[in-house]
Amino acid sequence: MSPEEVNSIFDVTENLKHKAILMTIYSAGLRVSEVCNLKITDIDSKNMQILIKQGKGKKDRYSLLSEANLKILREYWIRYHPTEYLFSGNGHTHAITPRTVQRILERSMKKTGITKHASIHTLRHCFATHLLENGTDICYIQRLLGHRNITTTTIYLHLRRLDLLNIKSPLDTFLDKKGERDD
């Protein structure tokens, strides 16, 4: 999805908790299990990062905490007063379930009118793809996503919309320099 489509999902999500969940997934590139298991103490506003504990492969990692995400999390905190899990489910003592998070996205997608198939993992893909499109080095993206192997991260390269017209062949570059010397 384009950045505009992702933004439209946030725009139609009226419930503050639901919007905070979706924005946190996208802004940090989280898996559904990772957002479900976030605890209040995992949000490090001083260093503007989120600690993801025991992600895939049972490894801990840090990801981004954007200014916009922090702002909505603060609004959410004031209204909902979470105790242990950042996003609790029924009864406020357990983590929200992955299925509940997926339903939140499905409802918002329906409201936008976007007909593309999308899952929570799609928001993670969008995070990586949009970072690539904005010039972020793939090695940084690898670390943010928690990929052990760079080849896992390179799947996002085929999703990236490259402006091929602005890429100059090394042959042309060489010949242009040679032509400058001939003039």
Image (cartoon, rainbow, N blue to C red):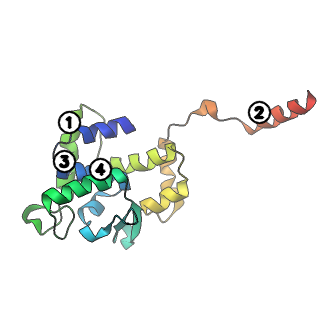
Q: Quadrant of residue 37?
A: bottom left
Q: What's the mark number on residue 104?
A: 3
Q: Amino acid at mark 1?
A: Lys
Q: What's the mark number on residue 172?
A: 2
79 vs 154, nearest the viewer: 79
Question: Residue 7: where, in percent of width, then height?
Answer: 32, 39
3 vs 124, nearest the viewer: 3
> How far apart are labels 2 and 3 at the CA level?
50 Å
Residue assigned mark 4: 23
Q: In the displayed image of the protein, which residue is found farthest to the top? A: 183
> How far apart are labels 1 and 2 at the CA level?
48 Å
In this view, the mark in front (3 or 4): 4
Residue assigned mark 1: 110
Q: Amino acid at mark 4?
A: Met
> How far apart are labels 3 and 4 at the CA level?
12 Å
Question: Residue 182: where, in percent of width, then height?
Answer: 92, 29
> How far apart are labels 4 and 1 at the CA level?
17 Å
Q: In terms of secondary structure, where does tag 4 sit?
A: helix
Q: In terms of secondary structure, where does tag 3 sit?
A: helix
Q: Quadrant of residue 167?
A: top right
